[in-house]
Structures are given as structure tokens and as C-alpha cells.
């Protein structure tokens, strides 16, 4: 079976195995085919954080996005309590919630536009469902501005509606690329260029938020008596508690310190989310640029495998698979956690299985690289078990899993076959040659036909380190929820400013812990 045949078979089984207690809904926005005519165009706001960040790169893969699709899981645990008679938004919600009783998949298409006939803004929804026995149904809902407000207010916990809001606001770069692709497919690139030109000035147009100034404005200074000393200062915090510190400690606080400072008594942060939002988005935007450099190592391996048979060592392949997984890591500004396949719970089970079968394998297996990719994916789908002991191929996985498995294993196999370091430049472990990641063997710098195991080390010129340090070097981001920079800041806070600064409070942009899957 070829790789494409395997993935097609997997997609068909996913539809047949769709359960009745959950239902996957694909989201498409803007669905320009739902517009009244070709002269009507979608009414879209600029991306939510455009004013605080620079223009995204042209290629979404450079940020770790293997695709830009959106989906939502409708489950029986979520019910809005609204009835169809509550209005058009109630009818839409009931139609979505009823999907939990249907075994199959659905598509929810959304497009906002100005209706010239009624002279009002309308958001049109089309819900199309296909059951696993092949029956289809389609319903259309038109919601005005008031209905949309009630829709978002009534069901804040509904994952499907949350993703609709996310797409309409383009809250992440994944949403930005998704909308861009839909507009380009329907109206052409010239329309996309004109649409973006209308708010092009928005990118990074806001003035730098002076977080230190906002921080000091939130503190009410109290008079100090002689016993306090000349350097001492007292403040009333926004929460009402009192803070005693020194002028030097306040002056030494960085922008990061001010943004994350909180009361040591009650834990209340000094600054609200709105006050630090521009600063937080700028930080996340900088991390996007660092992420783009890291992902560039792996996107170069997104190509057809070599047509030459190769001897694969189990441990070599396992370490390549580990490293390649980190190449898909993203964080919230790039993609919502619910849309990221590498953060799915099945990844932990997959890595546990691969470590068990590959780490102890000492023999060399001669295979065509494409055949090795097929064997790995087939093994994962049929032998990895979760959801009460069912193999993955018989469970309902998020959309995009098949494509992710393909790209993940393809990168790992291509790394093993294409990035072997040749003498005399060879160094042990993973290292860089001309900014490309390569690997060498462990014994004396001699490579023996590419069959030596990939060692758990990195040689960045002179100093080999452990595999975990390699992953940190590859990612340069918060794979373990705390970067080395943040660790240094935390140590400084403990030693110099224990009474002022609490924990860092930027969970919204912290990377999900893909490392837990290893």
C-alpha cells in the first residue's frame, strides 16, 4: 500500500468510526460561495492583534503550521439551554448541539456581508452534515448584528461558537492564513492584496506601550516616616494591600517585571490584561520570529523521500522522530491549542509505543525511505492504543491527524537519510553545518555508512549537551513552559525583588507541553 492509499484508507475509516457522543465540525470562513452574488464581498475586520505585531511570513509552514484548517468538537457535555424559538441564533445553536446524536461529520461555513436589499449586516451560516451511511442535510441561517451579539453572549463555553468568533476576529496567525486562503481561492490574490492594503498601516502601528509608566500609575504612594529610611517607599496596591520596598528596587524593575508583578498576599496582578495586552502580543510576535527560524530547519525536509534503499537503525530513527516532533511546536498566538494536532493526547501514546519498539532495536532494517514512512504510520494506527484499548485507526481523531502523521514521519525519515554528516567534518551527535542540522556517530567521529545510532547530544561547535538541551536549542521557545530567559528572570526576582514581583503571568502565549509526549 502506498503512502497516499494508506492516508485515504485512514480518512474513510475515520468517517465510518465516527461516534455518536461527539461530532467533528469543520469550519470555513469566509465561505464566499454563500454570498448573494459575485459583486458582494465579505465584511471583515482587520486581524485582532495587527496593531501590535509585524506582518506574518508568507509561508505558514515557517511557523510550524502544516495546515490552516479549523474544526470544533461538539460533545454531549455542552448544552446552551437555548431553544429554537429564542431566535435565529437559537436555531443555529440547536442545530449544532443536535449533531452529537449523529454519527458522521459536518461543515459549518460562515460569511459576513452587507445585504443591499435589506440594508443590514448579515452573517450567513450554512451547516452541512454527512452521516456515515452517506445521507446529507444542509441548513442555512442568517443572523443580524443583534443575533450575533446574543450568539456570542449566550454560549461562551461552546467550543464551536468560540472558534467562529476566533475566525471572524482572526485572533491567531492560523486564522489569518485560513481567511487569506479562502479569499484568495474565491476572489483571487489581487482581492487579498487590496483587502490587506486597506489596513496595511495597522501592522505594528501602535506606539510602544510604556508598561513601567502604567505600572507606577496603578500604585498609590504613601508617606514614609523617618524610621523607614531615605531609600524606603510605601505604596497601596490596586488590590488594597500595602507594599513596602525601596526606590532602587522600583527603578531596577524591567518591563517584563512590571507586566507580571502581583501582590504577594492575594496574588492579584497589578496590571490588567488590557493594560499589558500590547506588550504581551509584542513578546509573542518576537517569539514567532524565533519560531520561524527553527521551523525553517524542518520545512526543508518536506519533500518526497529518497528513491534509494537505506539501512535504518532503530535508535537513530527514534531520536529523529523526537526532534522532528518539536519542529511542529506552536503557541497560542500562532494557533489555538484545540487546533494543534501535536498537542493531542494520542501523541503521548504514540511516543511511548515508538520508544518501546525502537529504543531496544539493535539491528539494521533495509527499506526504501517511503516504505519506512508507510510502515511507521501503519504501525502507529494499528498498534497504538488509547480510548479504552482501541487502536488509533478505530478511534475518532481530530481532522488533520493523517496529514500530520505523514509530515512528521517523512521529516524524521528524510533527516536520517539526507542529513548524515560526512567525514572529515563530522562531529558526534546533532550539530549544524552551514546553518543546517546534521547528525554524526559516536565513535571517533567516524561514520559507517549511516548505520550508527543518532546520539543524544548536540555539538554546537565545541560543547556536546544532553538531548533535552538539544530540544531547547531547536525550539528556542517555551516547550517546558519556562524558557532559560524566564528562569534567569525568576532567579533575579527571588534574589532582588521578592516583595514586588510574583510569578510570570503570560500563560496565554506559553507553548503547550509537547515535551510531555516524550
Image (spheres, helix red, strand yellow):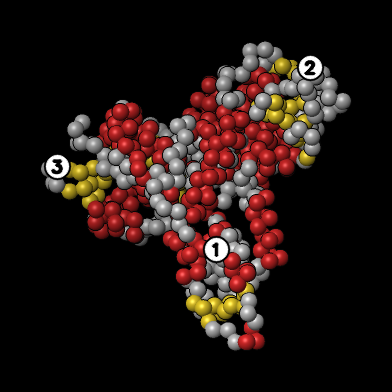
What residue sits right under mark 3 in the picture? 116
Q: Position of residue 329 (x, y in %)?
A: 58, 40
Is residue 518 visible in the rendered image? The answer is yes
**Closer mark to the observer between disc 1 and disc 2:** 1
- As helix, strand or loop, the secondary structure at mark 2 comes to loop
Measured in 3D between alpha carbons, the distance from the residue under mark 1 to the one under mark 3, in whole angstroms, is 49 Å
Q: Counting other residues with Cα less than 10 Å from the Cα at mark 1, is it few (<14), some (14-19), or many (20 or more)? A: many
Residue at horizontal 65%, vertical 38%?
A: 474
- As helix, strand or loop, the secondary structure at mark 3 comes to loop
Measured in 3D between alpha carbons, the distance from the residue under mark 1 to the one under mark 2, in whole angstroms, is 55 Å
- As helix, strand or loop, the secondary structure at mark 1 comes to helix
Is 432 above or below relative to 467?
above
Is 227 above or below relative to 134?
below
* Sequence-first disc among 1 and 3: 3
What residue sits right under mark 1 in the picture? 258
Q: Position of residue 104 (x, y in %)?
A: 42, 38
Q: Position of residue 335 (x, y in %)?
A: 49, 43
What residue sits right under mark 2 in the picture? 449
Amino acid at each position: 500500500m502506498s503512502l497516499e492509499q494508506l492516508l485515504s484508507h485512514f480518512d474513510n475509516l475515520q468517517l465510518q468510526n465516527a461516534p455518536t457522543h461527539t461530532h467533528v465540525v469543520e469550519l470555513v470562513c469566509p465561505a464566499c460561495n454563500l454570498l448573494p452574488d459575485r459583486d458582494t464581498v465579505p465584511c471583515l475586520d482587520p486581524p485582532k492583534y495587527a496593531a501590535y505585531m509585524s506582518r506574518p511570513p508568507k509561508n505558514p509552514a515557517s511557523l510550524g503550521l502544516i495546515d490552516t484548517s479549523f474544526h470544533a468538537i461538539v460533545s454531549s457535555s455542552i448544552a446552551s439551554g437555548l431553544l429554537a424559538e429564542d431566535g435565529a441564533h437559537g436555531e443555529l445553536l440547536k442545530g449544532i448541539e443536535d449533531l452529537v446524536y449523529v454519527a458522521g461529520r459536518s461543515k459549518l461555513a460562515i460569511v459576513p456581508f452587507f445585504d443591499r436589499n435589506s440594508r443590514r449586516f448579515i452573517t450567513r451560516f450554512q451547516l452541512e452534515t454527512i452521516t456515515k451511511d452517506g445521507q446529507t442535510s444542509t441548513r442555512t441561517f442568517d443572523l443580524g448584528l443583534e443575533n450575533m451579539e446574543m450568539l456570542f453572549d449566550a454560549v461562551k463555553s461552546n467550543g464551536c461558537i468560540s472558534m467562529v468568533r476566533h475566525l471572524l476576529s482572526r485572533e491567531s496567525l492560523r486564522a489569518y492564513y485560513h481567511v487569506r486562503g479562502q479569499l484568495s481561492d474565491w476572489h483571487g490574490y489581487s482581492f487579498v492584496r487590496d483587502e490587506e492594503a486597506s489596513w496595511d498601516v495597522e501592522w505594528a502601528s501602535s506606539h510602544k506601550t510604556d508598561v513601567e509608566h502604567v505600572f507606577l500609575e496603578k500604585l498609590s504612594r504613601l508617606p514614609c516616616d523617618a524610621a523607614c529610611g531615605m531609600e524606603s517607599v510605601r505604596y497601596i496596591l490596586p488590590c488594597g494591600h500595602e507594599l513596602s520596598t525601596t526606590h532602587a528596587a522600583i527603578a531596577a524593575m524591567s518591563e517584563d517585571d512590571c507586566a507580571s508583578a502581583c501582590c504577594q498576599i492575594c496574588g492579584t496582578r497589578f496590571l490588567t490584561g488590557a493594560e499589558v495586552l500590547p506588550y504581551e502580543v509584542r513578546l509573542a510576535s518576537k517569539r514567532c520570529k524565533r519560531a520561524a527560524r527553527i521551523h525553517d530547519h524542518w520545512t526543508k525536509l518536506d519533500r518526497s523521500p529518497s528513491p534509494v534503499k537505506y539501512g535504518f537503525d532503530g535508535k537513530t530513527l527514534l531520536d529523529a522522530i523526537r526532534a522532528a516532533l518539536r519542529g511542529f511546536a506552536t503557541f497560542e498566538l500562532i494557533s489555538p491549542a484545540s487546533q494543534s494536532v501535536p498537542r493531542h493526547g494520542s501523541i503521548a501514546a504514540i511516543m511511548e509505543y515508538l520508544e518501546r519498539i525502537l529504543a531496544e532495536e539493535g539491528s539494521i532494517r533495509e527499506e526504501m525511505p517511503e516504505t519506512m514512512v508507510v510502515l511507521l504510520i501503519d504501525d502507529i494506527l494499528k498498534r497504538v492504543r488509547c480510548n479504552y484499548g482501541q487502536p488509533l485507526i478505530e478511534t475518532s481523531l481530530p481532522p488533520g491527524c493523517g496529514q500530520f502523521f505523514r509530515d512528521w514521519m517523512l521529516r524524521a525519515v528524510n533527516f536520517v537519510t539526507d542529513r548524515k554528516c560526512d567525514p572529515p567534518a563530522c562531529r558526534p551527535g546533532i550539530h549544524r553545518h552551514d546553518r543546517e542540522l546534521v547528525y554524526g556517530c559516536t565513535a571517533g567521529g567516524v561514520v559507517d555508512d549511516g548505520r550508527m545510532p543518532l546520539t543524544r547530544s548536540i555539538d554546537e561547535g565545541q560543547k556536546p549537551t544532553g538531548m533535552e538541551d538539544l530540544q531547547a536549542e531547536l525550539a528556542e521557545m517555551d516547550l517546558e513552559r519556562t524558557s532559560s530567559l524566564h528562569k534567569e528572570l525568576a532567579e533575579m526576582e527571588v534574589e532582588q525583588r521578592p516583595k514586588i514581583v510574583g510569578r510570570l503571568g503570560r500563560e496565554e502565549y506559553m507553548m503547550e507541553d509537547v515535551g510531555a509526549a516524550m
